[in-house]
């Protein structure tokens, strides 16, 4: 009951972001568990890779709200959300808003010679669903585009 009360006390914009994050995270979890990654890759490249991305005035605020909404939604589910699922959901949410984003997937060799895989999303300024150790991963896949810099703020 406390969770429901906290949800209703959120501003309308945060409620929308939270609901979108929950739906996309559920969808991404199902896709990661049911589909081969090549299908997820072609879906993301075909649908979300070619949209024009222009840095906007509220890009940083939207990025933080997306990250917060995904964390809230992930805590709500009874299963653990993998970094790939969270990254796919974050990438789609960012690209839907025209925010430039790149989804990275990489691997690194651990000390015991096993492989460790990780996925994260990088916007123009910050990494979402990542940490300071992202630089130790060898990047195998990147989906997305660098931000388009607009001179003078007039869009031309």
Image (spheres, rainbow, N blue to C red):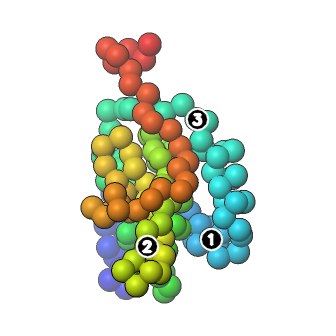
Quadrant into which the C terminus falls: top left
- In the figure, 13 relative to 155: above or below? below
Quadrant into which the N terminus falls: bottom left
Closer mark to the observer between disc 3 and disc 2: 2
Res 141 seen here: yes
State the separation of the CA atoms marked 2 and 1: 22 Å
Q: Quadrant of residue 27?
A: bottom right
Q: Kindly identify which numbered label has been placed on residue 63.
A: none
- In the figure, 57 relative to 74: above or below? above
Label whose residue precedes the other's in the sequence (2 or 1): 1
Mark 2 near mark 1, Cβ–Cβ under 8 Å? no
| Of residues 114 and 61, the one drawn nearer to the viewer in this rendering | 114
For the point 40% across and 50% down, which residue is it?
A: 122
**Residue designated by label 3:** 51
Closer mark to the observer between disc 1 and disc 3: 1
| Of residues 3 and 118, the one drawn nearer to the viewer in this rendering | 118
**Residue designated by label 1:** 32
Closer mark to the observer between disc 2 and disc 1: 2
**Residue designated by label 2:** 109
Residue 112 location in percent, x, y? Answer: 40, 85
For the point 48% across and 76% down, which residue is it?
A: 115
Q: Residues within 10 Å of mark 2 (few under 14, many from 20)?
A: few
Mark 3 near mark 2, Cβ–Cβ under 8 Å? no
Task: Farthest residue to the left: give it.
Answer: 132
Secondary structure beneath label 2: strand
State the separation of the CA atoms marked 1 and 3: 23 Å
């Amino acid at each position: 009951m406390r969770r429901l009360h906290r949800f209703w006390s959120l501003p309308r914009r945060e409620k929308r972001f939270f609901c979108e994050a929950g739906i996309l995270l559920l969808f991404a979890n199902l896709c990661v568990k049911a589909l081969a990654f090549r299908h997820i890759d072609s879906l993301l490249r075909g649908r979300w890779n070619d949209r024009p991305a222009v840095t906007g005035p509220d890009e940083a605020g939207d990025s933080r709200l997306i990250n917060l909404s995904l964390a809230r939604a992930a805590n709500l589910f009874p299963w653990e959300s993998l970094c790939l699922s969270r990254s796919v959901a974050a990438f789609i949410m960012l690209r839907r808003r025209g925010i430039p984003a790149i989804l990275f997937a990489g691997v690194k060799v651990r000390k015991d010679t096993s492989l460790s895989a990780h996925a994260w999303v990088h916007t123009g300024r910050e990494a979402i669903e990542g940490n300071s150790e992202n630089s130790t991963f060898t990047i195998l896949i990147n989906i997305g585009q660098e931000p388009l810099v607009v001179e003078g703020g007039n869009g031309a």
